[in-house]
Amino acid sequence: VTDNVKAGPLITAIACPIAALLCLATTGPVRFAAGAILALGLSGYGWTGALFPAGALRGIDRVALTAGIGLVVAVITGIGLSVLGFKLEAQWFAVAFALSGVAGSVLEALRSQGTSLRIPRPSPLEALRSQGSSLRIPRPSPLELLVLGVAAIALAAAGQLATVAVAAQPRPAFTQFWIVGVPEDPETVRVGVLSMEHTSTKFRIEINVDGRIGVWVSEVSLAPDEQRITDVKIPVNGRTIEANLYADGIGKPYRHVVLYRATASAPSEQWRGRG
Amino acid sequence: MRHLAITHLVVNRYAQAIGRLRGERSMSMWVLRLFGRRVDNRSKASELAAPLIGWLPVTVLGVAVGLVMIALAYSAARAGSGPSDFLYWLGIMVMIVSGIFALLEPTLTRTERLAIVVVLALGFYLVKVLLEPTAFTFLDEFQHLRTTNDILGTGRLFTDNPLLPVSPLYPGLELATVSFSQLTGLPVFYSGVVILGAARLLFGWAVFSFYESVGASSSVAGVASLIYMSNPGFMFFDSQFAYESFALPLGALVLLSVARREEGGQRMGWTAILIAAVAALAVTHHVTALMISAFLLMWAAISVFVRRETQAQSPLGPAFLMLVASVGWAVYVATSAVGYLAPHLVRALTDVLDLVGGALPGRELFRSGAGLDAPVYERIAALGSVALILAALPFGMWSIWTRHRRSAAAVALAAVAALYPASLALRVTPRGAEIAARASEFLYLGVGFVVAVAIIEFRVVGRWTARALLTAAGAVLVAGGLVIGLPQWARMPGPYLVGADPRSIEPEGIRAAEWTLQWLGTDNRILADRTNRLLLGTYGQQHAISSAADRVPVAALYLAPSIGPKELEILRVGRIQFVLIDRRLSSALPIVGVYVERGEVAQGAHLEPVSAEALGKFERPGVGRLFDSGDIQIYDVQSLLQASP
């Protein structure tokens, strides 16, 4: 690094590996911030600096192109990692994005030093197009700040409203009832109840084997989003296992499931219902 | 020297625009004063040159307030109370009007126009995000969610996707989402929302900048971008988690790179961007890549005739680069893409020919498969938007012929716009309507430019009354596009509806799919209806059978009144292990026209709901009924497989 190298590319080149390390070594908001900056910021920013001189692309153009290059880098590095045989996992993405950002910064530094890679000066049209757009946004007036602040609050409120409404939407109540075989034990079936009723509900489970009613009976009270899973021993020769679920105050079966024992010789194949 | 002529022309245009800006007094002065800016004749130009003043904060506030109203409308619709439709349209109108009125202000700086376009593009994206802010619910979203989950789960590309076999072969969106999720630790849904938000930012900027390069005017670019955003797919279809939503911004970046290369300066930079964007687009979406190739080829062909006059470079090289990349990827990697696309195109063309010949009944506009009609005001907006475009196109064409015929890109855009009336004919058949809807994203690229040229070149901007009228027309355009793009039942949340894609996604189905994952394991071959197939393929990670992926007529089995030899044969050929039955299907006709998949009704639509007997045909000895949640049952049909010869 010489005195001729500008600070921008140097900072980007240093920030890329730091952000990559933070992605891999931290969790929560720090990881999110580091990952977002690396993926949508640094990798693209390095390349916009390398490909376009300061006067040719400024302000909002550079921000948009930075995000765009970040997206393109994500696709190309993903394909590249796959072709090279790397698994598409966090560590390889972090390395690839960091390398991309560093490569762009190094190229920018080389081009700014007057080598054969030197960046041409902006054309008159480019200079005119970038007129008035600068990375330094003029200080907005207090009223403008207020308006933008209100807008930001309104946006946050809209998001919160929509999210809360999803959770609060009235949904029909239901209860899941199921029966599956236990592969490791041919004399046992597993019965489960998951209540998604709106209130706490009492259930009665009744198991019938080959037409014999009430071989096994149990009662359970479940709160909303609560489940109960029970293993039930059934007779060795039982072939057809039916289970009925009765809900509080309902006379007829609320849910009904049936399991057939297969005739396969291996114990693990005796129960259907296990994929 | 090659680019001097065109550069001189373009610079002169800008200088004229700036000159006009300095000599006019307009509404923005009033707004500037309102915002505490001291404005007089001497300081006006310098005040306007600064970014983030004038109309931009007003537009940002308008978009934000509009989004609050839309969120309130969604909340009211979910609760089943309140004037949800009124609030919704009020919110949409506040967003549109604040944006359009600002864009028609002649004294705006280029940065302000661009920022307003980007704010509107992001605002329209958030209309879709707020609809379902916690999960993906659109049909295409599930298809790509499956591919994303597979990449996350295996760390590999090109895994099988029973929901959309071609999706893993174009993994651009999924790669961007997976990489973001891996780096940030965010869940897939939120990663997808952020990635598509970044893509939308890119889209707004690239479309504006492309129009600006072609039209040599930021005024044209602003209005053209807004008209482009009125295309029926922009607000919802192109905002969903699907490959086209990600590919369109990349396509716009390709076009912008080509246009900027033509201008001369920073040729190396734009060439590098072009190559990278072409590579990313080729692996992201087949149709977008081919459409961009076709447009560039047309542009190149037109440039042969106009080249002598303008000295502009031919985009033949980029056109071939795009074509070779997209065809090469389809031939060497995505070999099934042709088989996936061709039948859709052939059937649509056949439908149109049959319709002309009288062999096919026409599609009833503004009516769903279950007979739901769109409100009258929505029909008026939709027809009004079409009428406005048809009325403006001739003026724009004339203007392009008189002022822009030396620009190959402008003529190419006009040629694209000329296809718009023909696309309307496709809308009268069901399959043609889908193709017309998919084509709108590309046709509006030309429509936006041509109509904007008509508005700007005929100098109707600037006068108060003209601005008010144009704002109203713009509102009709955007509202009409919204109505054409998505029917009311899909645009608003609410209670469960039969066969209604996003409105059929609810907790009972999701929990049933999750149960299969927990208790049956992954990749079981399961037959289900259209909605539950999506849930099983994503939440359940099952191999949900479809005719596209498995070459078996699954709808014939699901809807059959009983199980006979034909049904047993389908079970055997499809190696179907489990069947998920949703009893709610017998309660109503499907809103989208089908219960299981397209083609299940030979012609027209279902006339009555599927019978309860048909849904109950798996209730027979030997068939295990493993799961029951009231509306949904899951049957183990492997014994039927053993019984069938």
Image: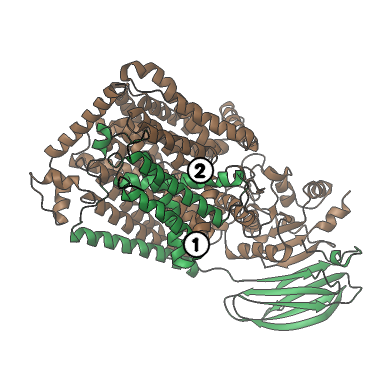
Chain colours: A green, B brown
Residue at the spot x=52%, y=40% of the render? B364
Q: Position of residue B162 (x, y in %)?
A: 67, 49
Q: Badge 1, how many Cα within 10 Å: few under 14, some, many 20+?
A: some
Chain letter of the residue beneath label 2 in the structure image:
B
Sequence order check, earlier mark of 1 and 2 = 1
Q: Position of residue B428 (x, y in %)?
A: 52, 35
Is label 2 in a helix, a strand or a loop? helix
> What distance separates the C-alpha of mark 1 from that of mark 2?
21 Å
Point out the image quarter for the N terminus of chain B.
top left
Q: Is residue B12 above or below residue B65?
A: above
Q: Nearer the viewer, residue A133 or B543?
A: A133
**Three-letter residue code for mark 2:** Glu
Q: Nearer the viewer, residue A166 or B252?
A: B252
Judge from the rendering whether residue B170 lies leftward or rightward of residue A177; answer left or right: left
Residue at the spot x=54%, y=32% of the render? B325
Chain letter of the residue beneath label 1 in the structure image:
B
Q: Which mark is residue B134?
A: 1
Q: Badge 2, how many Cα within 10 Å: few under 14, some, many 20+?
A: many
Judge from the rendering whether residue B566 lies leftward or rightward of residue B130; answer left or right: right
Number of disc labels: 2
Residues marked 1 and 2 touching at CB (< 8 Å): no
Q: Nearer the viewer, residue B361 or A199?
A: A199
Q: Position of residue B381 (x, y in %)?
A: 38, 44
Q: Is residue A33 above or below residue A133?
A: below
Q: Which mark is residue B244?
A: 2
The answer to whether dots 1 and 2 both sit on one chain is yes
Is label 1 in a helix, a strand or a loop? loop
The picture quadrant where one finds residue A195 is bottom right
Q: Position of residue B534 (x, y in %)?
A: 62, 54
